[in-house]
Structure formats: structure tokens, C-alpha cells
Image: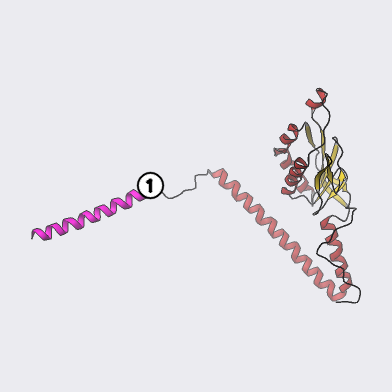
Amino acid sequence: MRKTVYIRFTIVLLIIGFMLAIQFNTVQNPETRDTRDIWAIRQELSKETETHSELLSEIYVLDQTILKYGNMVSESAELALQDTVEQLKKDIGLVEHTGPGIIIKVEPSLESVALGQPVEGISPDLLIRLINEINRFKANDIEVDGKRIIYSSPIRDVNGKTTVNNIPVRNAPFTIKIGTSTFEDAQKMYNQLEASTIGDDFYIDNLKLKIGKPEQNITISSYDQALNNQFLKEVPEGES
């Protein structure tokens, strides 16, 4: 009889110990909860919705291109190929852009002018940061001091001068033109650049960014240098 009582008592203690262990583990490792407020969640949801909308727009454009290409192939393969080539030239910057956009002026800061400090050229790192910031807001076309930026445009220091496409960029003042798909995109670009902290980086280098209001029509020159096609080779006529 006493042995049975001991066994039951031991089982009860085991159960109690097991429950205490579970409770202790729960207290030490609580379930991770999202502590963001409702506005932070709404902003995140808004960003995801905007990204989803942009992807749908890109899919629609590609679908229309495929449909157009298919229709043109049935009529004329040469015409379809020519149309595709022209679109590719436009996409990579080999065609002059005329359309909505904004113009940024890079000027010496007021402080440097007041103190009579010499105007220094923009550094390659700072110019690259600005272009990355512009591209982050989905610019279509960019021109720096009359030099069209394309996928292969080098920005580097050559003998103490910042160069774009191996051509020196003038000391401030000079302009940067940004082309967008629509006027609404130009307005969004303007607001985003105004809210960006990139201007603070320019002040450190005694430079100032003057962001112009969105315009309906600006002209951005085409890329006027030879392209280096490292992996593409022209097929002689008659070969397939």
C-alpha cells in the first residue's frame, strides 16, 4: 500500500515538474510578435502594393510587345525585327529622349561662395551615389553635363578630374537631366529627391543640388560613342 502511494506521489511530482518546465520555457522564449504600429504596417503594405502594381504594368507591356511582335511577324518578319531593334536602342539610350522629366543644377554652395573658396569638381563617388539615388526612383534616361548615361558608362577619376564616358565633367555649375515615362513619374521623382538626404552629402563637398520642378518636355541627348559589344558578334549576311 505504501509503495503504491509513493508511485502515485512520484507520478504527480513528474507531471508538476513537466508543467513547470514548459511554463519556464515559454517565459524565457516568448513568441515573437510584430510590435510595429498600424501606420508602419500600412506604409509597408503600401510599398508592397506599389511594387505589385509596377510588376503588373511591366508584365502588361511585355505581353503587348509579344502580341505586337507576333502580329508583325505574320505580316513582315523584317519589319518586326526592325521595330524590336529600335525599341532596344531607345531602352539603352542610343535614341534622343524628348518627354517629361526634371533638371537638377549642381552649383557651388552659398557658404563656399561667401568665403571665397575655390570651386571643386564633383567626386566620382558622389556622382555615382546621386545616379544610384536617381535610378532607385526609376529614372528612364539620365544625362550628366551633356553626357548620356547608359548601362556601360564609366564614371571614374582620371588625372584628378571626374569623367563620364571618358569625358571630363565641368566644375559646378552644371546640369543633370532626368527623363521619366510620364509627368506623374516626374512629379514623384521630384518629391522623392526633395525628401532624400543626398543633398547633405553635396553640402559636405561645398556643392548644392537645385532640383527643378517637373517639366512636360525636356530633351536628353543620345549616347554618341561606339558601343563595346564584348559578347555579341555580327553574323555575316546569308548565314543563319
The image position of residue 146, as x and y in percent, is 88, 45
**Could you tell me which quadrant the C terminus lies in?**
bottom right
The image position of residue 25, as x and y in percent, is 35, 50
Q: Residue at x 66, y 52 (%)?
A: 50
The kind of secondary structure element at disc 1 is: helix
Quarter of the image where one finds residue 230: bottom right
Which residues are the magenta region? 1-26
- Between residue 109 and residue 63, name the one nearer to us: 109
The image position of residue 120, as x and y in percent, is 82, 33
Q: Which residue is mark 1?
A: 28
Residue at the farthest left position: 1
- Between residue 145 and residue 180, name the one nearer to us: 145
- Between residue 232 and residue 69, name the one nearer to us: 232
Q: Residue at x 86, y 64 (%)?
A: 85
**Could you tell me which quadrant the N terminus lies in?**
bottom left
Question: In the image, 39: left or right of 61?
Answer: left
Question: In the image, 110: left or right of 43?
Answer: right
Residue at the farthest top position: 115
Q: Amino acid at mark 1?
A: Gln
Is residue 218 in view from this perspective? Answer: no
Quarter of the image where one finds residue 198: top right
- Between residue 140 and residue 93, name the one nearer to us: 93
